[in-house]
Structure formats: C-alpha cells, structure tokens
Image: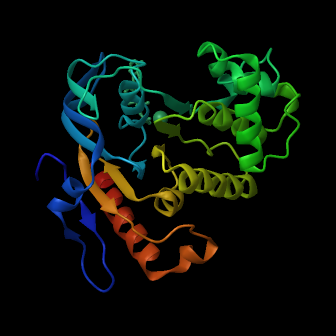
Amino acid sequence: MGRQGPVTRVEEGRAPTRQAGDAAADSAHVTIRGLTKRFPDAIVYERFDLDIPRGKLVSIFGPNGCGKSTLINMITGLIPIDAGEILFDGKPLRDIKFGYVFQNYREALFPWLRAIDNIQYPLKLMKLPKAERLTRTERMVAGLGVKIDLNRYPYELSGGQQQLVSIMRALVVEPQILFLDEPFSALDYEMTLFMRDQLQRVFVETGTTTVLVSHDLEEAVYLADRILLLSRCPASISDYVRYDAARPRSDATLSQHDFVRVKAHCLEVFQREVRKG
Ligand SMILES: Nc1ncnc2c1ncn2[C@@H]1O[C@H](COP(=O)(O)OP(=O)(O)O)[C@@H](O)[C@H]1O
Ligand SMILES: [Mg+2]
C-alpha cells in the first residue's frame, strides 16, 4: 500500500482491482499523515494516513466506535491530535471555512434562536453586514427550494426540518469543505430520501469537497465518489473504493449493476472486518 492507502475500482464483470495511481491522480484537498489519537480507554488512530480528494464526496463507513466522528473532529480542529499532521492544500489549518453538520442535530441548534437566526449565526460571527447576511441566506434557501417557515423556533420544527436548518447553517458560509456526521440517521425514510437528493444537488452545484459519515451502506455508496471503509480501533483503511456513476443519481441508480457490485464489495469488506472483532 502506498501513502495514499488502497483504492479499489470495482468494475463491471471483473473482480475489484487496486489502482494505486488513482488516488494520486486526484488532487488532495486534505492530507493526513502519521495521525495518532489516544483516549484513556482506546487507541483510536495510530500512524494513520489518508488523502481526501478535492471536489469529491467521500463517504466514511465503518464499525460503531471505530473513530469516524473523532476523525472529523480532528480534521476540523475541534479536538487535538496526539501526533502526525493534517494539511489543507499542503498547509496547516488556517482560515479554512468548514461546514459541519453534527451527528446530534437536537443539540446542534440554538433553541432560543429562530431557524433563520440559527442559519445566519455563522455569518454574524464572520461580521458580515446585516444586508449581506440576508441576501446570502435568501439565495441559499431559494437554491435549495426549502419550503419550511424559517421564522419558527427549533422546537416548532420536525426532526427533519431541524436537520435541514443545520445543513443550511453549514452551507451558508460557503464552506471549502463540508462535513456531515450521520446527518440523516434520525429522519424518517421519506425525509432521508429528500435530504439525500438535496445534498447531492448542493454537491453537484457547488463541487464542494464533502465528507459524509453514514451508517447506511446504500446511502454511503449512492452519494459517494469514494467510499472509505475503516477497520475497528485503531482505525485503518480497509479499502478506499471508487464509485464513478454519473450524477445526478436517482432511484434507478440503486438497481444498476455498478451500484449493486460496489455495495456488495463494501459489505464484504465490512463483514470481514466486523467478524475479526
Ligand atoms: N471524548 C472522548 N473521551 C474518551 N473516549 C472517546 C471520546 N470520544 C470518543 N471516544 C472513544 O473513541 C472511539 C471512537 O469514537 P467515535 O469517533 O465517536 O466513533 P464512531 O463515530 O466511529 O462511532 C470510541 O471507542 C469512543 O468510546
Ligand atoms: Mg460517530
């Protein structure tokens, strides 16, 4: 395995083949080298290397507790690392605008602010004038085709609507990198399907480098350009799989050979990993 970690391309009618050069062909937006992270009870990462390619959507899939949320928290600088480096365009963290949609959306919004004020909060932190904050927010809301009443408070919104507000709050800053940690896990199926397609739409329109943690393999593959399969703690890359189906993807995608094949491959790698434990 090279420094990029393995990359598997699952091709029609062929066994998966590793393409060491593929990851190198993509320009890396985030480069992680020699990352080590320990908690009192667990070594979560030990000399971990990963490249996140620019303008791609990477899904992260792995066993519960393997370190997915911890990885995002380290990349965004919310928690410190013990050793190694995380570089953006080859440089240390500096003035990078992240969007982060947290796993627990119920605790992510300020309950005392209306939805619209939650969304605009980061623009306030950026000290943008009021008129510009409003213009940017209105543009984004119109672009997404959102139909909820943004004058409501979080408690007046459904779970799906609250999560939509969280996503809009992450998007309004026009982030260079967008992180979503199991963003749809608490939503009903209908809302999940809607939100997946909203996310895909945003991705197609903006081309923002996106990292999505998902516990739903169908979703992980459906949305991804690359599926990062992690092992149990200390997490290592079990596989880094390409999925190049054209966008926009739709319900029809789910029954295409390529999709079924990639998903089956990911499941096999995951099962192998889980059985080890
Ligand atoms: N703040 C923390 N203090 C101690 N242990 C933690 C902390 N955060 C995470 N862990 C441990 O690190 C491991 C990875 O956690 P996490 O990144 O949340 O996993 P995942 O998101 O993949 O389910 C787990 O064993 C978890 O118990
Ligand atoms: Mg998690």
The foreground one among 56 and 183 is 56
Q: Residue furthest bottom?
A: 13
Q: Which residue lies furthest to the left in this view?
A: 2
Is residue 277 at least partly visible in the picture? no
Instruction: Name the residue rendered at 64%, 33% in the picture.
Output: 172
Residue 221 image position (x, y, % from top left): 46, 61
User: At 38% from the left edge and 47% from the top edge, which residue is drawn?
Assistant: 62
As drawn, 98 above or below 263: above
Horizontal placement of 271 versus 85: left or right? right
Image quarter where ligand 1 lies: top left
**Residue 167 image offset from top left, x and y in percent:** 64, 37
Location of residue 136 in the rendering, given as x and y in whole percent from the top left corner: 70, 33
Left or right position of 191 against 51: right
Numbered label tally: 0
Pick whichever, 227 or 238, lies toward us.
Answer: 227
Q: In this view, does 253 lie to the left or right of 61?
A: right
Q: Is residue 164 visible?
A: yes
Residue 12 to residue 201: above or below: below
Which residue is depicted at the point 42% across and 68% down? Answer: 263
Q: How is the image coloured?
A: rainbow
Give the side of residue 8 with respect to residue 146, left or right.
left
Please tell me whether residue 276 is drawn above or below residue 221 in the rendered image.
above
Q: Is residue 102 above or below residue 221?
A: above
Q: What residue is rendered at 15% in x and 60% in y?
A: 20
Query: Residue 73 sits in which quadrant?
Result: top left
